[in-house]
Image (spheres, grey):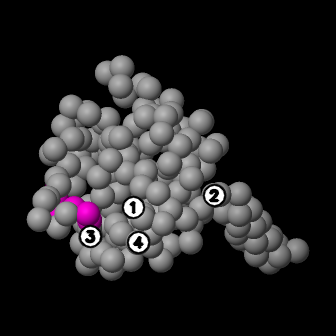
Amino acid sequence: MMRFILPLVIFLALAAFLFKGLSLDPREVPSPLIDKPAPAFILPQLHNPKKQFSPQDMKGKVWMLNVWASWCGSCKDEHPILMDIAQQKIVPVYGLNYKDKREDGLATLRNSGDPYTLVIFDADGKVGFDYGVYGVPETYIIDKQGVIRDKIIGAVTRQNLRERIQPLIEELNKQ
């Protein structure tokens, strides 16, 4: 009888860990960059490669960095929501065109509309790597001091816009 107790205890412990793991949302991966300064970079703009952009240009402003690509299906799903954010002027939205071809990114914005205040071109993905991007779309909320305050993995939805992004933007703008 005693020889069955140890395997039973081990089995129950493993079952408890499995049960807990199944209840987690795989899109809620905590980012080590939350509450840390946004990584610095200087990249060319998508529309005008002779002009550059750096997060330093945004000091004193709350802004959103949306990482997207023309080849990304989920980016197409979130596009109407980004258009609404831009139209309602909820927060300036800056795009990071990630591991894409310049002409494909430009064509996507020309055909679908351009919700971005400005789009930066990260052809080789080095800046995306610095931000911890492992799939697009990903969106970062950055405060007036240049600190990342939130990261949304996957497409921005109307629900997380209403329940997560807008309240955070309002709070950060008060500071």
Q: Which label number is shown at residue 67?
A: 1
Real-space CA distance between mark 4 and mark 1, rounded to the nearest whole angstrom: 17 Å
Q: Is residue 36 above or below residue 111?
A: above
Magenta residues, start to end: 40-47
Callout 2 environment at 10 Å: few (<14), some (14 to 19), or many (20+)? few
> Nearer the observer, disc 1 or disc 2?
1
Q: Please, what is the three-letter code of the amino acid marked with disc 2?
A: Asp
> Nearer the observer, disc 2 or disc 3?
3
Counting residues from the start of the chain, the first of labels 2 and 4 encountered is: 2
Real-space CA distance between mark 1 and mark 2, rounded to the nearest whole angstrom: 21 Å
Residue identified by numbered label 2: 25
Q: Circle 3 — which element?
A: strand
Left/right of residue 32 with respect to residue 22 in the rendered view:
left
Counting residues from the start of the chain, the first of labels 2 and 3 encountered is: 2
Q: Please, what is the three-letter code of the amino acid marked with disc 1?
A: Val
Real-space CA distance between mark 4 and mark 3, rounded to the nearest whole angstrom: 16 Å
- For image coordinates 17% across by 55% down, the residue present is 53
- For image coordinates 53% across by 57% down, the residue present is 79
Left/right of residue 144 with respect to residue 17 in the rendered view:
left
Residue identified by numbered label 3: 122
